[in-house]
Image: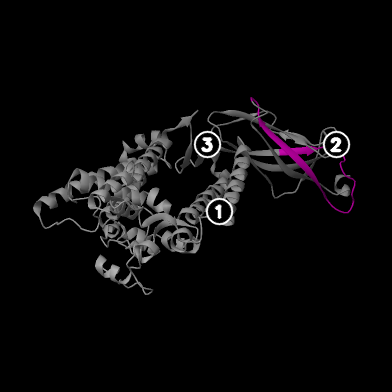
Amino acid sequence: MSTEEVSLKGKAYLAGWVSWRVKRYWFYGFVTLIALVVPWIRINGNHLFLLSFDKLKLHLMFIPFDMQELYLMPFLLMLLFIGIFGITVLGGRVFCGWMCPQTIFRVVYRDLIETKLLGLRKRIKNKQQEPDYSKMENKIKRLVAILIWTGLSFIAAADLMWYFVPPEDFLAYIQNPSEHLVLVGTVVGIVLFLVYDVIFLQENFCVYVCPYSRIQSVLYDDDTVMAVYNPNRGGEIYNENKEKLFTKQKDLLSVNTNAECTTCESCVTVCPTHIDIRKGLQLECINCLECVDACTEVMGKLGKPSLVEWSSEKETLYMQGKTNYFRPKILGYITILVIVSIVLGMMGSTKEYMLLNINKENRLYSINHTDEGKVRVENAYTFLFQNTLDKNHNYYFDVVAPKGMEGKIKIETPTEPFSVRPGIVKKKVIVLYTDEMLVNDDRKDTIIPLTIKAYAMDDKAKIAVVRQSTFTFPRADLVK
């Protein structure tokens, strides 16, 4: 085939091809937009997601939960971690390459600021060659790059804090920094970390600091989709000891005349974590697919498919058939995620719009005599009411005794409903009494189960809780 024919075939092969890098840029923009917008979404003053350290509340799907209702948080964390583990089994470290803030920040700094805006780096495709900072021009450009990234870091830090301090409060607090030193200190600390991490630590964070790279090796199997070099077509560049055998194509062809790898090392030059994908699976790989783009472009010009594919070892390396995406392990993760989501939805839907804790006082009971000559048995309790809504409510409660004792255990105090302000825990001493002979037992005191139904006077159907407690009735000889 002539050179012209190869060129025409290559152009036809690459026609309409969109690189993974461009797709990642669009996805990064989408993820960034979501991260910036979510804290501002509110319905009736409630956020889509907010874990407020300031007001000790969790907002989830526009429903506010008090800190005493944080039994939901373990389920959210389970969804997060099980979801990431499931994604890893299915698509390798695709989270690292496509969703991780560390990767997105590095791309913004390296590809956008250093390369496109300031020209410190010559090409996006060359991530191995560092700029020459001995030149004064480059020193000035680097200082400008640091200043630009510092400004962006403040936005990123503020956005992170908005998930813990709502934006409307954050903006008010930040105007009085002397009164909110913890908030200001946290923001500054995050900014300093981001400047150090993105500019100086760089991808070393992914390689040496992030524990996820160590976890992935346990989760991978032969069907896990990742960036894989095809040695069956390209030829073996490394031996079993990971020692490089060939640096020139002619040397490779002298051993394997069918080898298609051009040894151009475009896949190496473009790698942000500085690995050679032809060496095989490596924990430093973050599945950014830059190497797939590089090889696709080189081999595409020759009219051939890429030697580096986003595929599985089963399909590309071992040639044992198509990748099995819906294997038992993946179905297991999906099942667990569905179950956890259902449980979370059920628990979230049973939210209580008021909180009530009931504690009996240390004294079991008191026995008094009324003016009518009756014997009255009293039990005292401490009720802790909390209004989890955003306006005042008047509360009261009913006492439900067991069958046969209906109406015989009555409320001594309080006699009227009482008001509780939003977010306030109100302590009330409650006294229940009876002046009837509930149990005739000369040997021991009797514990009588009670049901306490507390409610808001203006909305008994919605704002109501049911709690179980007990009423202690003394021995018959004490009453008689």
Say whether residue 340 is magenta.
Answer: no
What residue did someone put label 2 on? 374
* Residue ID at (25%, 45%): 112
Kindly tell me whether residue 2 is visible in this rendering. Answer: yes
Give the quarter of the figure containing the N terminus: bottom left
CA separation in Å, label 1 and label 2? 71 Å
Seen from this angle, which residue lies furthest bottom? 241
| Count of numbered tags | 3
Q: Earlier in the sequence, mark 1 or mark 2?
A: 1
Give the quarter of the figure containing the C terminus: top right
In x, y percent, where is residue 116? 21, 44
CA separation in Å, label 2 and label 3? 55 Å
Instruction: Give the answer, above or below, for where 239 lies relative to 171.
Output: below
Asked where in the image residue 204 lies, by quadrant, the reply is: bottom left
Q: Which residues are magenta?
A: 431-458
What residue did someone put label 3 on? 61
Using the image, tell me which numbered label, if any, was put on residue 277: none
* Residue ID at (20%, 58%): 129
What residue did someone put label 1 on? 330
For badge 3, the amino acid type reads Met
The residue carrying pointer 2 sits among few (fewer than 14), some (14 to 19) or many (20 or more) residues within 10 Å by Cα, namely: some
In x, y percent, where is residue 159? 37, 41
- Observer-side mark, 1 or 3, equals 1
The residue carrying pointer 1 sits among few (fewer than 14), some (14 to 19) or many (20 or more) residues within 10 Å by Cα, namely: some
For badge 1, the amino acid type reads Ile
Secondary structure of the residue carrying numbered label 2: loop
Is 226 or 97 nearer to us in this picture? 226
- Observer-side mark, 1 or 2, equals 1
Secondary structure of the residue carrying numbered label 1: helix
* Label 2 close to label 3 by CB (< 8 Å): no
* Label 1 close to label 3 by CB (< 8 Å): no
Kindly tell me whether residue 248 is visible in this rendering. Answer: no
